[in-house]
Image: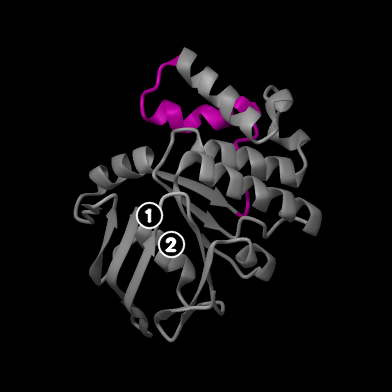
Amino acid sequence: MLQVRGLAKSFASGALFDGVDLEVASGQRVAIVGESGCGKSTLLNIVAGLDRPDRGEVLLAGQRLDFADDDALARWRRANVGFVFQAFHLLPYLTVAENVALPLALIGVAGTERASRAAASLESVGLGALANRRPGSLSGGEMQRAAIARALVHRPRLLLADEPTGNLDEANAGTVLQCLADEVRRAGAAALMVTHSRVAAASADRVLRLEHGRLVTER
């Protein structure tokens, strides 16, 4: 589903990575680990079309990502990418269901269908009873499960997670990681996660380390 070929990125301080290759299949979760500053988040941003590589290419379902057109990239992200962040990024003035429905609104799904799909997505992560609550009344684990529901509600081909358990205690982290695994398999998305957490990395199907500008297989 996701292919990265010969990706390179440099800054004034030098090369961050050079010649990165990566493949992630549908329904597969791949974790990238590495020291702080090694380029994990930059790599994730390039795969998402939020940053541009110096050279190399990113393909999703065989279609090459064109980094030349900002508007086209934004439309591509809305349709094809779901994001899960460490800080949840749920809007506090919307209900949980309204937060989950946001990606559907951005791609023009009608109101009735939006509500139905958001409700189904919340049920799938065990939060159906909390649909009308505000995010501030949820626990950290519940907020992150709501964020997973939001990330997958529009049926993206690619899910990107940046330290998804960084703000959670051990018990909540375990619940969220299992939920993430279940939902990625159900949706058939290719999932790429960057993390410092060994527990989070161990939950993935494959673990890669970004080291000296290259990806090496840990497991």
Q: Is residue 78 above or below residue 132?
A: below
The residue singled out by tag 1 in the image is: 48
Side of 90 where 102 appears, left or right: left
Question: Which part of the image, by quadrant, shows the C terminus?
Answer: bottom right
Side of 212 where 200 appears, left or right: right
Q: Which residues are magenta?
A: 86-111
Marks 2 & 1, CB-CB < 8 Å contact: yes
Residue 162 in the image, given as x and y percentages of width and height? 54, 58
Q: Dot 2: within a 10 Å radius of its alpha carbon, few (fewer than 14), some, or many (20 or more) residues? A: some
Residue 113 or 182: which is nearer the viewer?
A: 182
- Residue plotted at (65% across, 28% down): 123
**SS at mark 1 in the image:** loop
Residue 47 in the image, given as x and y percentages of width and height? 36, 59
Q: Is residue 17 magenta?
A: no
The residue singled out by tag 2 in the image is: 44
- Residue plotted at (31% across, 61% down): 3
> Which picture quadrant has residue 17?
bottom left
